[in-house]
Image: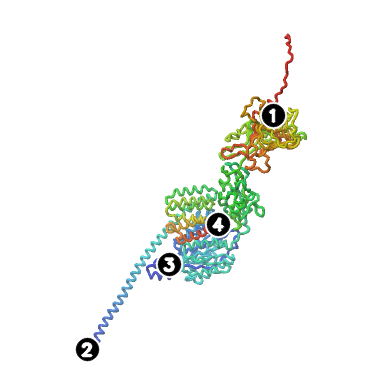
Amino acid sequence: MNSLVAHRAGRVLVGNLWAVAASLSLVFFVTMLFMGTPAKAQSAEDVCRATLVIDRSGSVARDDLTALIEHVEDLFWAGGIDDPRYQLAFWSFSSAAGSARSGNYNAPYHGFINTKGALEPRLNGPGGFMEKLRSINPSGATNYEQGLAYDRGQQNSTPEIRSIANDTDVFLFLTDGVPNTPGNGDNNSVARQAAYDTAAKYGAAKPGIRIVGGLIGAGLDPGSLNYMVSAPNVAGSVISVAGYGAELKNALMQIKAKCDEGNPPNPSAVYGLEPIVTTDSRIVAGSGNVTFNYSVNNTSGEHASRPSSWTVKRLLVGREQSVVPVTSAFANDAGRPYRDGYSCERLMLLISNNGSCTDATDGQRVFAPGSNDMSFDVGGVREAVIDDSWEAGTKLCYVLTITVPTNMNNPRDRYSRAACTTIGKLPSVQVHGGDIWVGRKMAGDTREVEGETLPPVNIRTSVATKSDGSSYGSWAEYGVFAAGTITGFASKSGLADPVLGLSDWNKLTFANTDSELGKYVEPDSVQNTMPNVATAILDRFEDSTDISAIEELDVGSLSSSGLYKKPSGGVVLSASEISKGRSIVVHVPEGKVTIVGDIRYDNGDDEPYTSITQIPQLVIIAQSIDIQADVTQVDAWLIANGDETGVIRTCDTPGPLTSQICQRPLQINGPVMARELQLRRTAGAGIGGAAADPAEIINLRADVYLWSQSEGRSGARAQTTHTIEMPPYF
Amino acid sequence: MAKNKQKKRLQWMADWSRRKKIIVGSVVAGVFLFVAMSLGAYIFINQKAHVETEESGDNSARRWEEYKKQREQESAVMTDAQEALARGETDKVDSIYEDAVKAEADTVRKIKLMIDQSKLLYGSGKQDEAIRVAKSAESLSEDKYIVAVWLARVYENRKEYKQAAEYYTLAGEWAQSTTNVSKLDKVYYDSQAVRVSALAGSHE
């Protein structure tokens, strides 16, 4: 039976009754054989292998074949199957005599390829799937038995045909005609039974094998096809396919559904994907860069994942909102640092909707066993540039998600623990008019008495580098000395100009680092001691005023210069202005001095100084010194030399610091000496032009030197009371 | 009288015989003529149909050969790109297609190449880039069929159903395009548009 003839006759029918009669007698089309084929049990891997059996008998018009090819190709791309778990092979059949048992009667043929087109070069390559599909040449009659790779009861001996036949999980048997060979006539019992017997062989070899018959064309008798798929141990069905358009396209999509019906994932292909995001930058200044590292750990020791969709979510969290719920506290019941079934909406709930969650980038890839770095996948998201307009305290977080993180369809939407950096400030300190020395001991340090050796002390401060390359940080106008190393702290005003390079930061830096210039003393920190300034000053006073009864002292209100001592307990110094000519020393040897208001000198603005002795000065010598948060200026010497503490804190507000705590700048005009200096101000380091503003300025002004010179000058002098002129001696 | 009657009878019989011959002759001639005309008509119609069929067959074969040739050329480009992709040379994919598009004079073929490029980009996870390439192909021709079909599928895959519906509708409007060899008609694409529109509604 030649269906091409029938097709032509159909056109003639329009104008010719005789032709109609002839064509009616030729009508044939369709039906399917029922066969059975030996095949092995379920595929070893977590894949479903489907074979398209395509009727290429002469009844198939080339335009129909073109449409079929287009529909098959669509299976490999978006909107089709497009999933490497589903593999596809095909062969075509008609009815070939002679070579049917061993020859290429099913040509063209080849093996299975995955339906993820982009990942399957064999799809379009020479001799590939599509080329073979396009080489089908319609001819011949319709033999369902041969459609299932058998001929007169024997399987085709071609290795490729056998391989495909034995590996097939699902057959989609597409035909536009009823069987007419072997035997004589359409739907003859011999042809029908041969198809049934062949299907039964497949059922016996692989019980439950799915054979879907697709009868293409209208008004065709599906009897033979129904009989074929009803063979024992075959999960068969027949679908009616009215034409080569939408109906055929839908029929092809049955492959996926039929695969899903009976191809549970094989445990041997189990894998799990764990998304991970990390960052080393806990805090970053505005306009700075932060590096986020992305990786996916495939827990399988041997199986790569399927192509898996991933997304990077950007979470911007408000200043006051904690990110602990999405960082350290974000873990599943097993303590793993991710959760399944998550979404942006759920993340937002964890941060009380105080922020935003958006997609930063996404993609798809196969993850090999073990750790998979995703630096190249995420692109620019790896180096996040901080928006200068974001308020300090805002948290920038990234979350890596995987849509299907295992070989199963569930769970879905696995979200990693968030990696966050706080946008804010790196407060700095500036030392004007002097040096900074770190690591020297106080005179009379009890630890020295006990023979202990102090460890080398380092200077480490942060440098904020902006996206334009400029740098901001702490610096001293002159020298910087440390018994250990010095990092980030510039000497010779090196960071006063943000565009200067690193080599300009250490012109007057003296540190003890191995094999480097500037190493100036043995690093056991027993270099020397600080000048014993406190003793020198205190020794000048023969008397002192006892202020034991005073809890809060307004030094500006003291009527005279002198030493004011509180032998035990602490004292609070309130805001005050020290008049011209006043030199006051507050000595609190066993307690803490707390400064609660600005202390300023009368700087002679209203009435200029007339003598060096008019320079006012305040010296505070105490066990420790605290400055409250609202204080912005302290004109005084600050010496904390207590044996037990010896701490100076520039802000005494307890607890963690934020941009809203200790946020006022502080300037200390005078020398500062302490066992420990806690620089706790968070002012400055603003955005734009305020980036260089320091939190603290310690300014060693000239008035300190002049006052010292004045105070150190003795009134005693040698007076000439007698002279005698001696004769020259020869 | 009887003699006259006999004579009339003989005359009638002679006339009848002559009439019979005429009638039979006429019938035979008529039948012969009818058969001849019918045969002539059959031959004429059949010949005409045969000619038409041969022409259709020729056209069909020519289209088939052209189709195969085109697809072989497109496959060759795609194979190069797929191999580059397999080597991790993503940028090479773009350059392969840019060169191929530049060398191609035919607009439809340019569009097909660009859609192939878009397919590879999409398949390798670069969805946004895939859409960008497809949309740039959209502007090359008034005939939107190829681009509309692909973008509808892409948007549906991305669960962007509103856009998917728009492109399915557009594909339906261009279903009569000569570039449509899939036998999918306007009814089909319109039904797809309705289907994804319903999905869009359920996801709002």
- Of all residues, the one furthest to the right in this rendering is A450
Kindly identify the residue that appears in the image at 46 percent across and 55 percent down.
Answer: B146
The Cα atoms of the two marked residues, 4 and 1, are separated by: 86 Å
Q: CA distance from mark 4 to mark 3?
A: 39 Å
Q: Which residue is mark 3?
A: A6
Which amino acid lies under the numbered mark 4 shown in the image of this protein? Asp
Q: Chain of mark 3?
A: A
Q: Amino acid at mark 2?
A: Asn
| Distance between the alpha carbons at the discs numbered 3 and 2 | 70 Å
Which residue is identified by label 2?
A: B4
Task: Tell me how far mark 1 sits from mark 3, CA to CA.
Answer: 122 Å
Say which amino acid is labelled 1: Ser
Per the image, the residue denoted by label 1 is A583
- Look at discs 4 and 3 and give the one toward the viewer: 4
Task: State the separation of the CA atoms marked 2 and 4.
Answer: 108 Å
Picture coordinates of residue B54, whole percent (x, y) = 39, 63
Which residue was labeled with disc 4?
A83
CA gap, disc 1 and disc 2: 186 Å
